[in-house]
Image: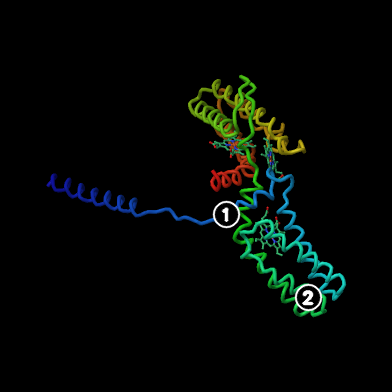
Amino acid sequence: MHGMRFSLLLVSVTVFAATQLAIAEEWEPEVAHIALPPDSIAEWYMPQNERQVWLHLMFDLRTELGAVELYLERKQQKKLVEWAVALEESYAKITEMVPEWAGEVELGATQALRDAAAAGDLENVEESVTQLRRTCSDCHSKWSASTVALYRSPDYSQLRLQDSKNGNEVDYAEAMREMSRSLVELKVARADGNFEEARKATIDLEARLRDLGESCDECHRDPSNRERFLGADALEPLKALRTSLTEPHDPKLSGRHLGTFGSTVCGGCHGVHRSLSELRSQLKP
Ligand code: HEC
Ligand code: HEC
Ligand code: HEC
């Protein structure tokens, strides 16, 4: 009797394990494909170029196409022709700059637009505008996001931070891992009631954050940016946390300060800086 129940149990455990194994073997990650722009576009962005030339071409196109639509609506032919000429020139630059994208543009459409404008054939101007707009959005839906991630996202890989404790230089990722270690030490010490150690970890963390703050003006001119995540207000919850890590300990109170600190300082800064930077390194390790 006893033996039978045991073997039944064993069978069902084996079956369960086998199903788990089958699932583990069959599962494959879903892979989303992101088309990357041709490398030739790099030459139209910083740091290869002094300016974000490609982006400014795009701004010109937007203005010119917008002007064409405006004067079409107002039926002002002279201005319409002027802007149609400018649009044709800018549009032609797309493939002068990135020849691989020849299949993405319809050079005939800007020509037809200019001819129709010159002839006062407003109906055909409108048709060409529609045709052009389609080429703009077709290309954007494929390549805007990856181009922005690759060429216009902040790059931290070259930045070095100085550790004020020992004068050592560390890169951004290493500084982050050290910060993370301090935070873990703090949490463990708090949970285990080692308050002196926990308070020491808050001081350590604060010093690391001040070191990090020295790097903000590499990219930001306005000091208010630094204030937002690392200013006195931002670091207030860390100070309050330190004060709350004493006997008699109120875990609710220290937990609240810890949460506020994590979400405003670490989480807030990650929200604007980290995702795009990580996407960039995934696309181009
Ligand atoms: C500048 C604002 C900023 C603040 C404040 C900040 N981080 Fe980061 N963190 C970043 C950026 C940017 C990256 C991505 C770095 C990269 O791509 O090289 C990052 C990455 C990380 C990583 C991943 C590191 C790796 O191995 O690549 C960890 C862990 C991390 N942060 C922890 C923290 C913790 C914990 C805090 C708060 C105590 C914090 N960070 C505060 C900007 C910040
Ligand atoms: C062959 C591809 C291609 C074509 C065609 C194209 N674009 Fe773009 N466009 C891009 C890429 C790539 C970006 C992303 C660049 C960036 O943000 O740095 C972009 C970005 C833009 C932006 C900036 C978006 C923003 O708000 O940041 C504007 C505006 C723009 N394009 C306008 C136009 C207009 C108008 C046309 C059509 C007349 C057009 N583009 C045709 C590739 C193209
Ligand atoms: C490698 C470049 C780089 C570094 C270093 C950097 N940032 Fe940024 N930061 C950016 C970019 C790019 C943006 C998004 C565009 C923008 O708003 O300027 C941004 C956005 C921000 C914003 C949001 C701005 C707004 O208008 O909403 C704040 C706040 C900010 N950063 C604070 C910081 C702080 C604090 C540090 C230092 C600890 C820092 N940044 C370091 C590149 C950087």
Q: Quadrant of ligand 2?
A: bottom right
Position of residue 153 measured from the top left corner of the image (x, y, whole percent) = 64, 46
Say which mark, if any, is on residue 36.
1
Whether residue 162 is visible to the viewer of this picture, yes or no, is yes
Drawn side of residue 186 relative to residue 3, left or right: right
Q: Dot 2 lies on which element?
A: helix
Would you identify the image quadrant in which residue 137 lies?
bottom right
- 35 shown above or below 158: below
Dot 1 alpha-carbon crowd within 10 angstroms: few under 14, some 14 to 19, many 20 or more: some
- 132 shown above or below 163: below
Would you identify the image quadrant in which residue 116 lies?
bottom right
Which one is in front, 40 or 22? 40
**Tag 2 residue:** 115
Say which mark, if any, is on residue 2.
none
Position of residue 71 measured from the top left corner of the image (x, y, whole percent) = 83, 71
Which mark is in front, 2 or 1? Answer: 2
Amino acid on which the number 1 mark rests in the picture: Leu
Q: CA distance from mark 2 to mark 1?
A: 35 Å
Amino acid on which the number 2 mark rests in the picture: Asp
